[in-house]
Amino acid sequence: MSLEKITNPLNARHWLGHMEADYRYTLGVAGERFLKEIKENARIMGAKCPKCGVIFVPPRLYCEKCFAKLEEWVDVGKRGEVYTYTVATIDVDGKKLDKPQIYALIKFEGVHGGLIHRIGETDKVYIGMKVEAVFKPPSERKASINDIAYFKPIEH
Amino acid sequence: MFGKKRVAIVGAGITLFRRNLKETGKELAYHAAKMALEQAGMELRDIQSVVMGTAPDAFDGVHMKGEYLADGAGAYHKPYTRVFVGGGTGVFTPLAGWWHVASGKFDTCLVVCEEKMSSCYPHPQYAFTTIFDPILERPIGMNLIWIFALEMHRYMHKHNIKKEDIALVSVKNKRNALDNPIAQLGANITVEDVLNSEIMAWPVQRLDVSPTSDGAAAVVLVSEDVAKEVTDNPVWIDGVGWCIDSTHWTNRDLYYPDYVEYAARMAYKMAGIKNPPKEIDVAEPYDPFDYKELHHMEGLLLCRKGEAPKLTREGVTQRDGDLPVCPSGGLLGCGNPIAAAGLMKVCEIFWQLRGEAGKRQVPGDPRTGVAQAWGDLMQYGSVIVLRR
Amino acid sequence: MKGEEKTLSEVAIVGVGCVGFRPVTPELSYKELMFEAAVKAYEDAGGINPREDIDVFVTCAEDYLEGFSIFDEFVPDQLGAALRPLFTVSGDGMLGLATAYMLIKTGQFDTVVVEAHSKASDILTYMDIVQFGLDPIFNRPLGGHPYYIAGLEMTRYLYETGTTEEQCAQVVVKNKRNAILNPYAAYGANITLDQVMRSEKLFHPLKKLEISVPADGCIVMVLASEKVAEKLTDKPVWVKGVGWCTETPSLETRDWTRAVYTRLAAEMAYKEAKITNPWRDIDFAEIHDLFAYKELQHMEALKLCDYGEAGKLLEEGLTGLDGELPVNPSGGLLGMGYGLEASGLQKVLEVVLQLRGEAGARQIDNAEVGLAHTWRGIPTATGAVAILSNVK
Amino acid sequence: MSVKVKHFPGEEIETKDFREGKVLFESFRPKARYAWSAGIAISRFLEELKNGRIIASTCSKCGRIMVPPRIYCEKCFKPTDGWTYVKDTGVINTFSVSYIASDASRLKEPIVVAVIELDGASPGMGIVHLLGEYGDWRQLKIGMRVQAVWKPPEERVGAITDIKYFKPVKG
């Protein structure tokens, strides 16, 4: 334990700084193919493990369970189901959002995994709700997960 | 015996080292890990534990990047730990793998190192500005090259070493790298090329320095029992050592890396090595800058203080010399994806001791090799001794 | 694993030192905070001199939580580790403890120090940093406060297990009250269920008062082999088993109900500690409660009860301070404050103090076996478990 | 690298591929801001810089006078038990002449950075700072004497940059 302490709070200095830089992430071998399909064809693809048989969404280069290389890609459709959801009322800075934001994990039939995304065009959400991807117009797509604007409920 | 289990390396894998690779960090880790498993004749399900080594999060641009990389490293549903000692990480990570197995807690451990430096844009150099003290050092604009230049200058001053002698390291390693299929910068260059290259921070010039890179490497570690089952040709981890010096690098004489010597002594003691120059057949000291190879040869007690330039001049450290140093081509020739580059050195010793290094094979049937990495603020030494 | 083989040495915790936990610590730098905790730990371990008596030092830290690249550079001096074998585990303090345990088990080392701290008050943009931990291609571009991930998990957990929002809120009431009795706790309070239930739903169904608030502090521990431990202390706390596990970093493919990382870590630790019936064999547990529902979810993953049962046990008072199996007698992270990478050692600290009979007003009678559990928080699925006992 | 391996994975890309759209990417800039507590030793050090003085801490066990100051002696693992001012003069322990900025871009005029061992501190106790007023950098030598050039008192804020740089002096 030190022999001396700061006893006047005005003498306790602090120093401001940051660790900020610009980053440019390659989408990777699997990510690029996946997001290109969304950008160019508005298609959501999965990758099938030749050993485990499961279809991964998002697709990946390898099976995380057995390390097989995944080479067979399949279209999983743009319709899925809400597996779980939440309604956020604050943003990352802790400020109240003008309008609460619904997030959900959307699962696709026969698929391992799914997509985490926003839910739009509704205030209501529940587990098991059927939803469909709403893509941005082709001209606005950039091969990003945000090329899907959100998922919206499908009317029965 | 539960403790002091002997630990073997039975497989190694590596990706290309390049300025920019298309793969994500996870994908790079996967390629290296998968290759290491294939070389070991093992599958992911045979692996009981995983250790990751990767340098600052500020390169890949992901906070807690060990967690992010876990699936690529094969850690799905497994005990997984990331260790991090700056530039020393690549050689340190198999040391962490060693205690996973030597403790008796696991029979197998997959050791993976990854670096994707190109994510930091426009230049990975920027990530290095935050390795310095934020109050006393960052405000004067410290950058990474400066601290190497300060050390190099002190080393040259203390032993009256000429830049010509130091440049020979760059010439040797870049030439060795011509025989290395993963290498980024293999080349036939001359001492004059080094001396005429652009001044970065005198005495450091462009060709004194290794480049930034993307890449990954991996090794599979197993206990003696498992080693007997999977291979006739295991390479044993017989010595491990590591040491960190004080944070206050401006209070130390940078001319000599005490921390490397301490780490080396720890590893040699465990391996029963009494006379390193005689007993070690091949060495891979850390060479992110040409003078660093010399500095580290001295710290590894492969020669006396200030003597490494002479050995280099005399050709002792050439691939066919008495003590081949960096036959891989080192970081100067292969590239420097930090943690992966350190583990590349361990892979190289593994291949050299198994006689699998092809065109890079050092003559004389080497039996004992040492790899070493350096890190932090002129502060960290990690050392591994391997034996056939 | 070779659990059945003869062990070379048991491993004990022989010294602990803690500074904090406080909401802010403006009068100390992170180095000075670490120094104070280290001095306490070395004194507690029989007055050892770290310059000579310690074989290895392990620190646990993540760069962006410190504001440095390569934080390892800045740790040796204040621990007495300059020019000594030290390294950083980029992870929770309990992974450091597991590492120390393995180091001693190799037979090469007799004394190992583990350090973890939080200087959370140095960070001005903590949530942005948590967000920076998300997958940069598939998750981070969606933006938003990253704790929405906890909201997603809580929804599914309640749905599958039938656990109620009230039961989750009850965790807060219990833990904050326990914390009043803990001098190391920053956020003890007497609070009602109604107050928790009425606090703002930030990430439906997760409420503001159900989220642990970061705090500053540092914990240093000294571990030793059997032969050294018995020389240094007459109150060794033995590490009977450790386990740790990463489920998967992928948010999309992980299990959203069962905290699989905790279940697998617990299975490893239980096997080593020869625990077959956790509820019966364990006297009390310190469980990671960054969010209130996580205490319940983790209890189930630790096999202290069946899935969906934890909420009921809590309601019946069985996990209270005087219950059958007290959970988070320290006050948990909800009461102590979230010590970031130190949170695992916060848990271990309480188990050590309880097993030594030094837990003051919150002392549990006749405690012999305690469980410490940790999780690395959002967005990870990595956890660890340690089983400790005052009986060798 | 092993002769047993014929193919080494990795798809090389060029920097221009990003511009030309041949490789797709996601961009991000994190918000990572800090207010580090300077603590007991460095708060005092900064305050004294504002006064135009350099303060060191001392350890009565090993007798070292340490700068930058700290509240513990890392050699003895004891709390430091005294303070003393050291001089703003010293000798160059090592230096470098840098043509690169921290973002790796090229500078027209070089910056000279040095480790300076301060008079009055224990041998080898240096701080890192810039050099100025040195004329031709080729004339600089390790072992040269230097002195701090301070900002005017009204411009000092209690920062290491309250010293503008060190300049060579006769000695």
Image (spheres, rainbow, N blue to C red):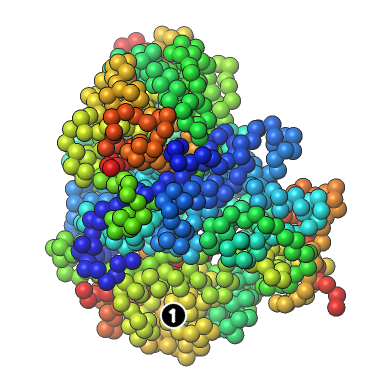
Is residue B83 something one can see in this rendering? no
Which of B295 and B271 lies nearest the eye of the viewer?
Answer: B271
At numbered mark 1, what does the secondary structure look like: helix, strand or loop? loop
Q: Residue at x 65, y 64 (%)?
A: A55
Q: Residue at x 31, y 71 (%)?
A: C272
Tag 1: Cα neighbours inside 10 Å, few (<14), some, or many (≥20)?
some
Q: Position of residue C213 (x, y in %)?
A: 51, 65
Establish if B246 lies above or below C135: above
Q: Residue at x 43, y 56 (%)?
A: B42
Q: Please state, as top left, top right, bottom left or bottom right, where the N terminus of chain B lies in the image.
A: bottom left
Is residue C154 something one can see in this rendering? yes
Q: Position of residue A130 (x, y in %)?
A: 77, 74
The amino acid type found where label 1 is placed reads Lys
Which of C65 and C282 lies nearest the eye of the viewer?
Answer: C282
Which of D14 and A70 lies nearest the eye of the viewer?
Answer: A70
Image-based side of C276 in relation to A103, left or right: left
Establish if C156 lies above or below A15: below
Q: Residue at x 65, y 51 (%)?
A: A30
Q: Which residue is mark 1?
A: C303
Q: Quadrant of residue B263?
A: top left
Q: Position of residue D70 (x, y in %)?
A: 32, 41
Q: Residue furthest left?
A: C231
